[in-house]
Image (cartoon, rainbow, N blue to C red):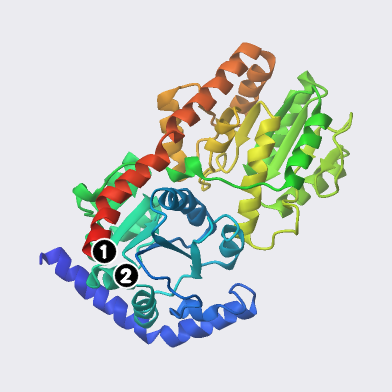
Amino acid sequence: MGVVARKGMLVYKIYRALSYVVSPLLQIHLRWRKIRGLEHPTRLPERLGRPSLTRPPGPLLWFHAVSLGEGMAAIPVIKECVKWRPDLNILLTTTTMSAFEVIINQLPTGVLHQFSPIDTPAAMDAFLDYWNPNAIMLLESELWPNLIMASSRKGILLALLNARVSMKSFKLWSAPVLFPLISLLLSKFSLIIPLSSMQAIHFQLLQAPPFIINFAGDLKYVVEYDASKEQFRSIDDLKVQLGHRKVWMASSIHRGEEEVMLGVHKVLKQVYPDLVTIIVPRYPQHGKDIAQKLQKEGQHVALRSQHQRIVPGRNIYVVDTLETGNKRKKWQDKLCMALDVMLRHLYRLTPVAVIGGSFIPGLAGHNISEAAAAGCAVLTGYHVGHFSHMLREMQRLNPLSVLQVPGKLELEEAILKFLSDGKVLEARQTASKQAFHALSNGIIANAWNVLYFHVLKQALLKR
């Protein structure tokens, strides 16, 4: 064992001891979360490694995703597993209550769900002893020391899918105290599938063995959301209301960005008096605040929450509610899920989509692939965070697929150009759609092939 590995083992022993000591406090914290409605009312024991389901006989694969986004990214891979190996049992764990309430309706028949155990020695050992998985697939950056080390001791193979590490985490993990531990944890994996070449470099700098890093593509390109009949009817009705008016949309905007978008709207409206600007804030309350401000200024706004129609004289449509046909979403994960579902259909209504979360320093962008998939001319700001790899890949395939602009003036000029020149707009729309299809094509098949060859084949033979 090398010097770094020895230091890593020492740090892990300290972590294990601390996690054992704080276990009683974590259990109190879980009960407090249950009182606040953040934990399932009857399934809290699962968080301590105690199962609520019977383990079926035969080999079992465990997919672990903390939040909604990671869980949704895992589902296409799970479906591929069910398709090619229906004899395997599959278990998906999530941490948040909101992720469970969304994902449970998206899982293929027969796939088991449990809430993930907290990363304490007792909870993790109890979970692994009961479920006894043949292999474990973690999503993105879920490097839980007790989970990984206990799995390694038990001879369970590990894979990290759609692997990524934010710049903040990379700096933290590269620090002298944590670097040996992270290096030790990464050495226990049989496969890492990074979502970009830059992420692969980050993992190699953290001393992940190069031979376990394999590419398949970003699973965010192939995430699927099932929409309700009510949503389809709502979008079709909006399409009728818009008619032949000029339309553009600003999606997933954060506080402060509305000043940019409304400034652009004011300029565009001078050229196209019947213009409709669709504004979709990242969170509904922000939409209500925008609408109140505009109404005080005497502007005519159509609010989705009030079921107001886009009639002549109304030039701004604010999506200030994200209901999906049943009840209003309560938690942040469910809000984001509802927004993602809504956006996929709203993008069909607009030829031009501006992706927010990217025009103010400190923000980190949002998924641009959904607008591209719908065939929009896609624009975004410069502050795109870890979505920069997606932007670079699309621009590499076709420079016209995504346009980055630094601010309001450049955004005005670009949208005016798109709305006034049909050929330019069509070229942008075609480029974005083609880039999306090129990047999304074959991702699931690639992920399955790499996963089966490097992990599942050996895991099933080994155990």
Left or right relative to 199: residue 99: right
- Crowding near pointer 1: few (<14 within 10 Å), some, many (20+)? many
Residue 217 showing in the rendered view: no
Q: Is residue 101 above or below residue 278?
A: below
Q: Is residue 391 above or below residue 118?
A: above
Q: Which residue is mark 1?
A: 185
x and y percentages locating residue 56 in the rendered image: 42, 70
What x and y, as percent, mark residue 459? 26, 60
Q: Secondary structure at mark 1?
A: helix
| Position of residue 426 in the picture relative to residue 112 (left or right) | right
Tag of residue 145: 2
Q: Residue at x 47, y 27 (%)?
A: 435
Labels 1 and 2 touching (C-beta < 8 A) = yes
Circle 2 packing at 10 Å, graded few (<14), some (14-19), many (20+), is: many
Quarter of the figure with the N terminus: bottom left
Q: Is residue 84 left or right of residue 242?
A: left
Instruction: Give residue 233's mark.
Output: none
**Amino acid under label 2?**
Pro
* Residue 234 visible in image: yes
Q: Amino acid at mark 1?
A: Leu
Residue drawn at point x = 78 percent, y = 41 percent: 234
Between discs 1 and 2, the one toward the N terminus: 2
Q: How far separated are the C-alphas under marks 1 and 2?
A: 7 Å
Question: In the picture, residue 48 is in which quadrant?
Answer: bottom left
Q: Nearer the viewer, residue 454 or 243?
A: 454
Which quadrant is home to the C terminus? bottom left
Report helix, strand or loop for mark 2.
Answer: helix
Percent of width and height locating residue 117? 44, 74
Q: Residue at x 71, y 39 (%)?
A: 279
